[in-house]
Every structure is written in structure tokens, then in C-alpha cells.
Image: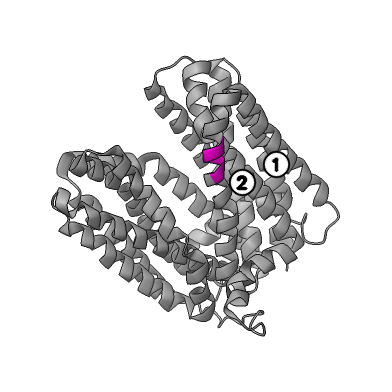
Amino acid sequence: MTLAGPAAAGRRPSRRRLLADRDACLYLGGQITSMLGHSSLWLAAGIWIKTLTGSSSQAALVWFAFLLGNLTGPLSAVLVDRLPVRPLLIATNLACAANVLLLLLVHGEDDAWLIYPVIFVYGAASALLNAGASALVRPLFGDELLPTANAVLATAKQGMNLFAPMLGAGLFAMVGATPVIIADAAGFLVAATAISLIRTRTPRATDPSAGRPGVWAELSAGVRHLMSTAPLRRVVLAFSVVTLGLGLLEPAVFSVNSEGLHRPPAFMGVLFTLQGAGAVLGGIFSARAVRAFGEVRTAALSLAAVSVGIALMALPALPAVLLGFALYGAALPWLVVAQQTQLQRLTPPGMQGRAAAAAGMLTRTPQAFGIAAGSALLAVLGHLALIGIIAGLTACASAWLFLTGRGKHGTDRPACLEQ
């Protein structure tokens, strides 16, 4: 039995229904435990490389290795749409645990090279697990509880981003890398065990693109689905514009701190902590927003709030900047939950993996270009002009969603009313 539940159960608060369901608790508990290990390893891995080699550039390559592995997402997503998703996720989590444990072989500078292939595989597995999760959650939770499930995971992720990296760095500083490695491997084992204990049956996926021959047709099916489904296309393209802006914002926020507020570099920690706290708070209410406004309007409202938050960062007043970072953080989970819920709801089972991978590529790649462009434009335009451009881009994306989402079937209706 899925969590879609009978009509009587539908009247109960959705979070209470999640907590009352054995399969939901297993899945969410496994994912949240695994997130803790992942988030803890990130900062620790970079610090470890820096400690072993003394090189900041080599430490930064940890993130590059992960991104390189993540680029395999469109290939691994085909496996999600071709193989039974639960056994695939179990096997991938077990393989990830074994992969991470290879880091126990690193004892000195001569062994430091081993960290990079491990993190590359880590990135590739992350792409596969994300696509697989998208394929699993709809049959597991049903359409009505998709926003709540996505909101719980988004809120947990933001919470992990707040304190897990500091936990990992603290453990590394006190007792070395071994506890962090074992904790991450244990997280993968917990996730694999939780998925194996789920009783809900996931139907065999039927690929609607199976009639198209050729490797390219297979790999591009996810992008074609996104671009041919009007509500998905609007939200994904708006999200892509926003991530471009977020990339531009990355170098500008340091100037906000130093030139706008005249604060020392360490004060960035306060700003990012406030942003993270806002994200946790926003994640708590994101499912309620999706059910009340529908996915498209929730995404549009999120982008409007992001635009206001970014604009406040340009003001040379500490209360305004603090409010801007908090509002910016609180609004982003609404966009993420709306986009993920819409994607899972409007994508056929045999396309879930590739559609999720395509959406991930389309919404993450612009951020990398934005960071590069922002670094160059900052020196020419200054941070105030750059922030104005970013706020304007985000406001335009919000207005576009509001205007194009009107009167379209299924775009403005709350997800819980879709049958």
C-alpha cells in the first residue's frame, strides 16, 4: 500500500501521515542518516588534502573531482529507467560504502592521490542515487504526499549543510579522518538497509521513448520530455536563470561583506549561518506552500522573495543585509521542492531517472558559468551593479512564471488536487 491512502486518511495532516507510515519512516530515516555522513565528509576531505600536501589548489580539486563524476548523471540515469530501482539503489549504496572505505588506505602524502578517484566515484554515484530517488519516491509516497516528502528531505539537507561540515572538520581536527570515513560508509549501509526493508512495491517502469532507436535518443529522452512538457519547461528554465544568478552572486557576497559592511572575512560565517537557518525555516513550510499555491506559483513566489533578498544585500546597513541573507535562504527551498515535486508528478515512471538527471544538469551547469562570469564582472562593474543584475534576472524569471502559468491546465492547481 502506498501513502496515497484512502480519503479518510487524506484528511490527516500530511506530516503526521508520513510519521505514521513504516515505509516512509524507513526511507526518510535512511536518507537523512546518509546525508549526515556525506555532508561531514566534504569539508574534511578538502582539509585532509591540505594537511597532507600543503596545497590549497590540490584541496580545491576535491570539489572538481566530485563535479566531474557528477557529469556521468545522464549515463547512469539510463540504468535507473532500465533496471528495477530498489535493487539498483541498494547495490549502489553498498558500492558507495566500499568505495569510501578505500580512503582508510590513505596514510600520507604519497597516498593522497587515492582521494581523487574515490571522490570521482562518489560524484558519479551521487548522480545515480539522485535519479533513483526521483524514480522511487512517487510510487512510495503517492502524488498527494510528494511535496511533504520532498520538503522533509530539503529541510534535512539544509540542516545538514549548517552543522555537518563543521562536525566533520571538528572530528578530523580531533581524531583524524578515520571516524569521518567510517561514519560516511555507515550512512550508506543504513540507507541500503532501509531501502531493502521497504514493503511498498514499485511497478516495473515502461519507457515511453522505447520506440526511438539509437543511443542519442536514449540519452536525450529526459531533456526532450522536459522541453515538451510546458509546465516542466517553464519551471526548469526559470530555475536555470536563477542558478546562473546564484553563480554570479558567489563572488559578489564577499564584496558585500568587505566593501558594503566593512566586516572582516570571518563575518562571512555569520552571514552563511543566517542563510542556512533561513533555509531550514523555509523548508519547513515549503510543502504547505506547494499544496496551497501549486508548483508553478510556489516557484514564482520563491523567485520573487529571492530577488528581494538579493536586493537587500546591496544596502550598506547590517540589519538589511542580515534580513536579505535570511530571506534568500528561506525562499530557495520553496523553489527546490516545487521543481522536484512537479518533475516527479508529471514524468512517467520509465522516464523518471533521465528526466531528473536532465533537470539536474540544466539547473546546475549555469551556476558554474555564473561563478566564472561573476568573478570577471565583479572587477569591472563592482558588486552593487552585479547584485542589481542578479536581482533583476531573478525578478524577471518570477514575473515570467506568474504570467505564463496562468490559465494552463495543471500548472496552477495545487499538487494535492491533481489526480
Q: Which residue is mark 1?
A: 301
Is the stretch drawn in magenta largely helix, strand or loop? helix
Between 392 and 301, the residue placed more toward the observer is 392
Q: Secondary structure at mark 1?
A: helix
Q: Is residue 81 left or right of residue 159?
A: right
Amino acid type, mark 2? Trp
Query: Which badge, 1 or 2, comes first in the chain's sequence?
Result: 1
Quadrant in which the N terminus appears: bottom right
Magenta segment includes 224: no
224 above or below 363?
A: below
Residue at coordinates 41% horizontally, 39% vertically from top-left? 162
What percent of the width, then of the height, locates residue 240?
63, 49
In which quarter of the view is residue 349 placed? bottom right
Amino acid type, mark 1? Leu
| Highlighted magenta segment, given as a residue range | 369-373
Q: Secondary structure at mark 2?
A: helix
- Whether residue 37 is visible here, answered yes or no, is yes
Q: Which residue is mark 2?
A: 334
What percent of the width, then of the height, locates residue 313?
58, 24
Quadrant in which the C terminus appears: bottom right
